[in-house]
Amino acid sequence: MNLVLHNFFRSSASVRVRAALNLKGLAYEHVSYVLRKKEHRAEAFLELNPQGLVPALQLEDGTILNQSLAIIDYLDGQHPEPALLPESALDRAWVRGLAHAVSCDIHPLNNLRVLQYLDQQLGVSEEGVAEWFRHWVDEGFASLEKQLASDARRGRFCYGDTPGLADICLFAQVANNRRFDVDMSPYPTLQAIHDHCLELPAIVDALPEHHPHAN
Amino acid sequence: MNLVLHNFFRSSASVRVRAALNLKGLAYEHVSYVLRKKEHRAEAFLELNPQGLVPALQLEDGTILNQSLAIIDYLDGQHPEPALLPESALDRAWVRGLAHAVSCDIHPLNNLRVLQYLDQQLGVSEEGVAEWFRHWVDEGFASLEKQLASDARRGRFCYGDTPGLADICLFAQVANNRRFDVDMSPYPTLQAIHDHCLELPAIVDALPEHHPHAN
């Protein structure tokens, strides 16, 4: 059996795992779930993955892994080249800290399910939802810009001249931002890293619009 | 210089790192930041940690690490005993997946800064904020209960009979829930794991009420 990625073309966490798989040169099949139709809450998927969230990676033996950063960590251990995390323990902690600033402090607040709750349960206006989205992106990006702009380890990417875990998270977040018109001009360092990602087909192919089931 | 933990007694991510430091038997000093007073946004702290979030761990040489799970990962690598993550790559991914279900899918939504936004920017009522809090806990805990109840690797803790990363995250979340009266009866497996944590002084000492600067 091949690797199977259970995912949704537009999901930002799915973009991360697709980019990692592509960078590692691993072949995989897609099973797609349309989140607005709650296909990821269907019984068949919940049996595979009780977390009921995409992405989930099904390994050759059927084992299901979930949580995008746990999946990427696993892939990086099993397929060390190209490395997505630095060798040195301190630098690994640095890169993980950058990645988690996106994956824990920005993205969870701007998930579809959260925006739907704001809209449907709290009656927040469309503009209010957009402000919410941009608020958490701006909070997180302002910190990341400050951290990265002055860091000597930065190169074309967050850490050195090859893309890694933090770049993947940043890139996926910028892709996600497009729907809400986030102004990137206060974040020239992040913009430059993003633009360097755009030069790499492995990362570009992970974008929603290049997904085989995009619509 | 000793290890210094920049933290706040009530912060759930701070509880995680305190529990990890205690389990590893590492001595550390506290610098406390009262979040409601925005002390973590003061210039002096932002210079140390531009993310402006607690916890941040200052190492003996002055290096600052941030993001609780990145810190714990680092500590686990530098001080391997007792291990907070399993040896096997697959089991590590499993435990990380459980931990991230809390650290990415529950806790970021229920942070003080988010609850304040709901209250102050969106005018959500006190009861509405409490419902929001419980909603995301229930979403996450229902999945975790399902995952853990049927998993053969579970023992007294999420993975085997010694506490690890997932237990720390779960424990810190349950402590956080106390302010919002979350009903744990649908989650007997999670409750049992939590209760086993309560038997360990290293973990209990991480609770807000045992913090030297608690008030």
Image (cartoon, coloured by chain):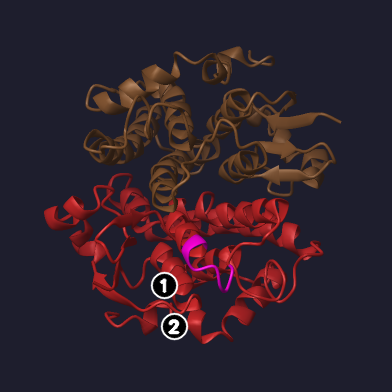
Chain colours: A brown, B red
Name above or below for residue B172 compared with residue A4: below
Q: Amino acid at mark 2?
A: Asp
Where's residue B165, x and y in %? Answer: 56, 64
Q: Amino acid at mark 1?
A: Arg
Mark 2 lies on residue: B205
Q: Is residue B36 left or right of residue A33?
A: left
Where's residue A4, x and y in %? Answer: 76, 30
Please report whichever mark, 2 or 1, sits nearer to the chain's N-terminal start.
1
Question: To which chain does the residue with label 1 belong?
Answer: B
The answer to whether residue B24 of the structure is visible from this angle is yes
Q: Is residue B94 left or right of residue B67?
A: right
CA gap, disc 2 to disc 1?
8 Å
Same chain for mark 2 and mark 1? The answer is yes
Name above or below for residue B21 compared with residue A63: below
The image's mark for residue B18 is 1
Where's residue A191, x and y in %? Answer: 32, 22
Residue A97: in magenta span: no
Whether the residues at callouts 2 and 1 have beta carbons within 8 Å, the answer is yes
Question: To which chain does the residue with label 2 belong?
Answer: B
Helix, strand or loop for disc 2: loop
